[in-house]
Amino acid sequence: MMLKKIQLAGAAALAFGLVTVPAQAASSLAINGTLNKLTGGTTFDVWKFKILGTGTFTVDVAAYEASQSNVSTPGYFTNDINGDGELTWLDADTYFYHDTGSIKTTDAIFRCDDVENNCGGVTGASNYFNGYTPGTSPLTRTTHLLTETSVDGSIHFRRDPWYDVAVNTPGDYQFLIADFRLDPAEAVAGMNAGDNFSAPTGFVSPILDHADYRVTFSSIDMYISISGDTIILTPVPEPETWVMLLAGLGLVGWRMNNKVRKKSAAIVAG
Ligand SMILES: [Ca+2]
Ligand SMILES: [Ca+2]
Ligand SMILES: [Ca+2]
Ligand SMILES: [Ca+2]
C-alpha cells in the first residue's frame, strides 16, 4: 500500500560494531516515501519504532522542493531534492504515537511540523497530546533552529521539520508523516481529510496528485536499523560494558571456533 524506499547508512558500522566501533559511533538511516492525493484528502505513512533503551536521535525531513512559499518572495528557488525529475510540495508534518497495535487518539504523544514552528517553540512545551509535557512525556523533542544550516538538503526556510528526540521511556512507538496537518482523529480515520498539497503561490502547473519525502534518522548513542517498516534503535553499550562484552565474545568465539573447525573438517573429510 505504501510506496517506500529505504537507504541504510551505518549498516556496515552495525555489522562491525562489535569489534571496531567506539561508544560514540554514529548511525543513520534514511527512509523515502510518497504521499498521495485521493478523493477524500491526502494519505499519510506510518513507520514503526522499536526503541530498546534510552538515548537520543535526530529526525530530519527533506520534502518541500522550493525555498519559499511564494515564487515572488526574495530568495525563491526550486531544487529537486530527491532527484526524481519532478518538483513536489509536501509541507511535512510529523508525529510520534505509542504503538498499541493500531492508531488511537490516546496514543498520540507529540507533533513537529516545521523548524521552530508547531514543534514546541522556545520552551518545547506546546504540541504535546494527551496531557504529556516535556517533564512527563516518554519521548521529548527539541527543534533545531532556523539559524542552523540544513544538513540533509532541505531548502525551505521552515517547512521541513528537524528535531532531536530524547527517549525517556524505551518501548514501541509509531512515527507518522503527513501533509500539514494530521489531527489525531484524522489519523485514526486513516485519511488527512480534505487536505491538498500546497505548491508555492504563483507556481505554474504544479504536481498536486502526490508528494515525496525523505527522512533521515541519526544518533550518536544508538544504532539504527530497519526490518520491514520497523525502525529499531539499540543503545550503544557504555565503554565498561564493551570490555565485558568483548571479553565474553572472545571466550564464546574461541569455543565456537573450536566447534566450527571440527565441523568444517568433518564436512571436508566427508
Ligand atoms: Ca531537513
Ligand atoms: Ca523531486
Ligand atoms: Ca511542515
Ligand atoms: Ca487535516
Image (cartoon, rainbow, N blue to C red):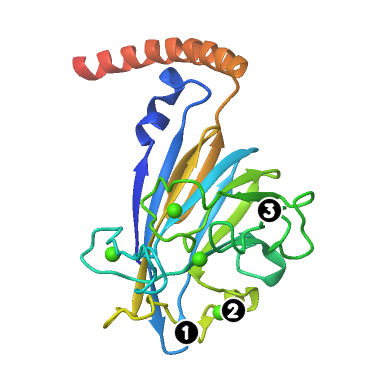
Callout 2: few (<14), some (14-19), or many (20+) C-alpha neighbours within 10 Å? few
Whether the residue carrying mark 3 lies under 8 Å from ligand 3 is answered with no
Front one among 161 and 219: 161
Which residue is identified by label 1? 41
Mark 2 falls on what kind of element?
A: helix
What SS does tag 3 mark? loop
Task: Measure the C-alpha gap from mark 2 to mark 3.
Answer: 27 Å
Q: Amino acid at mark 1?
A: Gly
Q: Is residue 99 visible?
A: no
Amino acid of disc 2:
Glu
Q: Which residue is mark 3?
A: 122
Q: Which secondary structure lies at badge 1?
A: strand
Left or right of residue 206: residue 23: right
Q: Earlier in the sequence, mark 2 or mark 3?
A: 3
Amino acid at dot 3:
Val
Q: Nearer the viewer, mark 2 or mark 3?
A: 3
Do the CB atoms of the residues marked 1 and 2 lie less than 8 Å apart?
A: yes
Residue ID for mark 2: 186
